[in-house]
Amino acid sequence: MLRFLANRVLVAIPTLILISIIVFSLQQLLPGDPALIIGGGEASPEVIAAIREEYGFNDPLVIQYFHWIGDIFRGDFGVSYRTRQPIGPMILDKIPVTVTLGAAAMLFSLVIGIPLGILAALGKGKGWDHVVTVFAMSGISIPNFWLGIMLILLFAVKLRWLPAGGFVPFTEDPIGCLRSIAMPAVVLGTALAAAMMRHTRSAMLNILQQDYVRTARSKGLAERVVIVRHAFLNALVPIITLATLQFGTLLAGAVLTEQVFSIPGLGKMVVDSVFNREYQAVQAVTLLSGVAFVAMNLLADILYFWANPKLRANR
Amino acid sequence: MSVSVSSAGPGKTRVPRPAQSQFALTFRRFARNRAALAGLIIVGLFAILAIFAPLIAPQDPTATDWGAIRQSPSLAHLFGTDELGRDVFSRILYGARASLLAGFVSVLISFGVGVPLGMVAGYFGGFLDTVIMRVVDAFLAIPFLILAIALAAFLGPSLSNAMIAIGISFAPVFARLARAQTMVVKVEEYIEAARSIGAPHSVILSRHVFVNILPPLLVQTTLAIATAIIAEAALGFLGLGQQPPAPSWGSMLDNARASLMIAPTMAIYPGVAIFLTVLGFNLLGDGLHDALDPKD
Amino acid sequence: MTNALLSRTALAAIFLAGFSAAGSAQDLSIALADDPDALDPVTNRTHVGITVMGVMCDGLLTTDEDLNFVPVLAESWSWSDDGLALTMNLRQDVTFQDGTPFNADAVKAGLERALNQPDSQRAADISSISSVEAPGEYEVVVNVSEPSAQLLSKFAERVGIIFSPTAIEETGAADIGAAPVCAGPYAFDERVAQDRIVVKKVEDYWNADAYAFDTVTFRVMPDDSVRLANLQSGDVDIMEKLDPSNVDVVEQDPNITVEPVAVMNNQALMYNLEQDGPFASADVRNAFELSLDRNAINQVAFGGRYLAGNQVTPPNSQYYDPATPMPERDVEGAKALLEQAGVEMPVEFEILVPNRPLSVRVAQMMQAMSQEAGFATELNVVDFATTLQMTEDGNFTAWGPIGPQFANDPDAVAFQVLHSTGSRNLSRYYSDEMDALLEETRTQTDPAERVEVFHKVAALAAADEPVTYLYHMPQIYAYDSAIEGLTYTGDGFLRLVDVTRAE
């Protein structure tokens, strides 16, 4: 186990370094002088010079990179030139928001996706299967920002049941939090639920054909017991793996969902930072999302390894 | 090209006999799949609407009419008018052009960048493979849309930059798939045969490997177009795609959102258009996948 | 099983927390349309930044809704006979929010910071100040190099907000904007970037009884419909910048009060006079102006809730020159002017448009209108920050709609845009005649005479047309009808003194 883990971590390191280089290089795509853009129209030449100094734009690229990555290792993501707030704590403020939203979306997708997936697998080729398939296909194809607008139109503008946007932290007002997050979670979770349905369906179909399930059936075990104890528990492994791997999709989806519902999370921070020309913040969030993705992959590997007795025996 | 003529030999071994019936089989399986056919029809329909938009559209999509802003659907304006009195139906038709163009061009970029890299990595293996795949992994680790937004933002907002951003962000997916398929194909007998008669790597890669990994790549291409269309709409929605007054579905949705209180129907049409087009490509891709690989 | 247990515990927690949250202290929440920049009067560049600082901080003086000066921290002031020294007497019972006493030394330090800090955005506004003295503990003398009719208006704005010298010492002038400490009813509590700023009541504030709310929470909601929906659902009490096209709908709602506050501002199209091409000719620029129907722009883009205008100040202002009325749209006249200028038709034209929905809407209308008069107008829609850089670099033909959002004196909207040394003179308009007039508006201390000079400025600007003024935007607030007693400064900012919530 330890060797497996060590191996995985070792493999992840060059990926992490490359991610940091990619993210750093984004800055080079900027047309024009970044100091001028950060300073805005009213900045005097002295201010521009000060910005250039503060951000180290005068140094060679390689030095700039090492400064940047060195600062990040010390937890220093830079300071927003607009608000003078440090970017690190700014991100820390946003993480719980996006995690709350992501967790709610994940929960929604599991609650909807897994039962429907099982239902479809059990009735393969019959009515339910078709309904679920259509559902899943639509869920994957619907643009989530549009779904968001439609839900706002119905539940906020017409019926006035739910707030049209904004976010209430759970610790401040739990009911307000649930109200503020209900629509965004559904919007963010829909594509995920669809993926979950399809995945559960094929995982279940795969396992229902396995020998041990057939044996269990032939032994005369009740169908429910077979399905729950043997089939589903075994299908759970690939499902959990998928759930972990959907992390990136979730984060990307959060960008639009948070934008539509004005939720102050990481996704909205990326978009706001883009429009405020806070390039350090854009880089910081992009870098973090890449690192988090690698970490989640590692977690998925470990989960898969741990949940799969056959793999464990082989090592 | 001259290279391939001089080594016509291996070209003949390229298509083994069973492939013919394989194709027929695939086609028959596809034709029997009603969902896939529906997808094909939807995609075809939108393609026709996009191509013939100037003929079909009742009005110039940028023609304004101050006297008729935010009107509900009527015979004169099938889908009503927007906040500047422009005909929403005509804008949807022209928006189809932007969306389909973005879908095809950005996937073309992904394909053009990703597939050669993946094939080279899979074919030669070794250090080259390690380097390419590490870079691919690094790109894949950054969530697709965040990378696309960051790229589009740093490049500057426009439809062509959005296509480049989406294309680059999606290229790693093609690289990874091309590599995996190449590794399967490269140990096949006909490749070994071509190599044994001394065909250069470039010929083997382009004439043998590429042709044989094309089917799974086509499935991926179809699905990627669906993703690219959503991504383009998303960038347009955020103001990082097609710039006004030219219509795109994403920016139309963004505009409609501002008028949600007074003209709610404006937000419906562009969304339905995106949804249907993406659904069409997804159904098509799924159908192709099932037809090529009917295990499931 | 564990799951069921977990969810039950969670539910219990929800209810407990829900009850305990009830009956908490009174909060007033205000929805802002933008995320403010640094909360520092010296470096501030955003309108919303002033909204927040205006609630937190008292200035030396302020303006009432008719733009008369009202004393706040400066109880009284007087000019010397030669107009070269301004003496201000300060309130004596004031401390900064960190306990530091508010006195003449603090004011002197604050004004000197605005003058001398390298990244000060205010230095140009008060460049006429030659020195600041503190002859008594509560007496400040400001010496100016020439009579300065505009100076008091600056003291009624950001320059007049003084920060605690102790806090600046401790935090550093560069970072004070992240933890502001001033003298005023509400002290900075916390800020979550792009989300909220919370300020809490200062209990020992000299006029604490007049402020009913324990905390004020500013919530950042850039999306117009989200801001409005949150007001309608009662999640916020006050919102700024209601989309003018929504006013008709919102006025139907009995629970919401809509209040448009007239502000001396303008939105305009700025031409790059240094660029070669047809638009270097004033005739062509005047032709473009004639092709526009400003009233139609106001009707279509803003539901008729803004004010069409052709001068630097709104038509209802005393500074508006009645001898230069707004021209009617005249397509034939425009074509004739173009012919007279001898340019090739259609005249190629590109407008650089900031990527904001309403700006884009207006630009599209100008595009359509001008096309009918012989212009081939293209739009280049770019995000706002980039337009700032492009115009700074001179990389544009025309830029707009753009303009100052607020002013408490016409100097703020005219001088920096039209004077050859002005920081916002991105038209590159260099006219000796205009410079002389604008300088006279500053040295002319007789109010009636000064109005006349501004009329001349408006007439000259209309003839040279370095800028086409389009419309004026009232600041449209909407708030829960239970909120009572809201008043506004002359430049359209909220005043929370004596504001209460009816039960």
Image: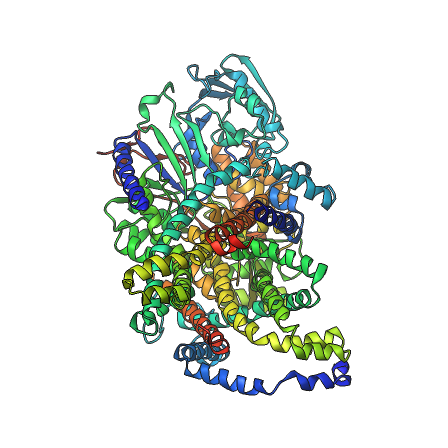
Residue found farthest to the top? C136
Say which of C284 and A298 sits in front.
A298
Question: Residue B213: horizontal and vertical position, in percent?
Answer: 60, 74
Closer-to-camera residue (C384/A3)? A3
Q: Is residue C295 above or below residue B226?
A: above
Q: Determine whether B88 is above or below A144 in the image.
A: below
The quarter of the image holding the C terminus of chain C is top left
- Left/right placement of residue A73 relative to residue B236 reads right
Q: Is C289 placed left or right of C57 in the picture?
A: right
> Residue at the location (28% across, 49% down)?
C251
| Residue C200 quadrant | top left
Q: Residue A22: image x %, image y %?
A: 64, 52
How many marks can you see? Answer: 0
* Relative side of C403 to C240, left or right: right
Q: Which of the 4 image quadrants contains residue A149?
A: bottom left
The residue most toward the front is A219
As drawn, B9 above or below C228: below
Q: Is residue A150 visible?
A: no
Q: Is residue B10 left or right of residue A177?
A: right
Which residue is at 23% across, 34% downward? C502
Whole-percent x, y for residue B293 in the image: 49, 75
Q: Nearer the viewer, residue C70 or B276?
A: B276
Residue that sits furthest to the left in the current view: C503
